[in-house]
Image (cartoon, helix red, strand yellow):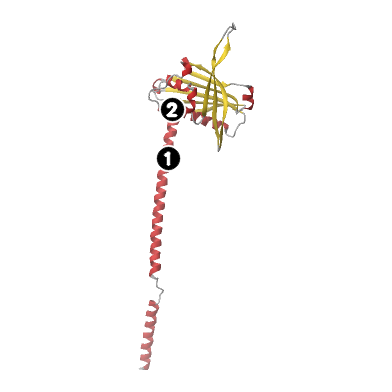
Amino acid sequence: MMMTTLTTATTRSTKTCCCSSKSSSPSVPPLITARRKTNDSTNTRRRKRRTTTTRRRATTTTTTSNEMDAFEAKSSKNLKCELVSNVANRFTVKGTILLGAHVNADDVYNMLTDYENASRVFPSTIKKVEYLGFEEEELEDGEARRPGAVKRIKQTCNWKFFIFGGNFNIELGVVENDAKRHMTCTLEGAASQRKFGFLREFEGSWEVEENGEEGTKVTHVLSVKPSLTPPYASDIFVKQVEGILEDVEREVESWENGYAVPMHRR
């Protein structure tokens, strides 16, 4: 009987211990549980934000890429620019642009020969232009003087190279051929301008042609020899000509009634 009682007691004790063992497992306080739930909720929101941000970035990148592709397609179709030659650091770049068929070739030529308003048309390249008049030439008989074929202008140009920039003055002699809508300009002035100026040699030309249904074709050739040749000079001059032709396109698109003949050609 005592053995039975002892066994029963032992069994009860064992059951009690087991129950006690089960009930003594560490319980999580409500505060910690709440914090875990809050952290899980916060992490979920963060993951959603990251996904949304990634999607937005992807959308923005796609949009920007599409815009750039459209711009490049437009530029490659209407605007072409290339380095023609580089001889003894004299860089020659040629660029062409096709304007709409509705654009009058004479209006474009009028704009290109309106030197005193060039800073408005080409703000990134030209700061100021002063028209100095005709370069006089003496007649063979020596009795009088008359305006020659060369017109003189003084131009303040802007330059930029990486984070550096500034401006410089040059005097140019301009020869116009109104019948062919062709104009050339070359570096003029004293020898000191060539020797100590920003440019050793400079020659530029413009030609405007009616190109049938394709529209008005504008050709710009720039040939320069800088006093100091910067790195990647060819790329700089190609980009410069591209920018100039883009300025022409922007100016033409702003017209409503064409462009009047400049005063010095009337």
Q: Percent x, y for residue 6? A: 38, 90
Q: Is residue 243 above or below residue 7?
A: above
Which residue is pictured at 62% across the width and 21% down the height?
190
The amino acid at mark 2 is Glu
Disc 2, SS: helix
**Residue 4 — which label?**
none
Which residue is pictured at 40% across the width and 51% down the height?
51
Q: Where on the picture, by quarter, is residue 30?
A: bottom left
Q: Is residue 94 above or below residue 36?
A: above
Q: Percent x, y for residue 7? A: 37, 88
Label 2: few (<14), some or many (≥20) within 10 Å? some
The residue pinned by badge 1 equals: 64
Q: Percent x, y for residue 184? A: 53, 20
Q: Is residue 8 above or below residue 78?
A: below
* Residue 154 can be seen, yes or no: yes
Mark 2 or mark 1: which comes first in sequence? Answer: 1
Task: Out of 140 and 177, give the one closest to the viewer.
Answer: 140
The residue pinned by badge 2 equals: 251
Q: Percent x, y for residue 23? A: 38, 77
Which residue is pictured at 51% across the width and 17% down the height?
176
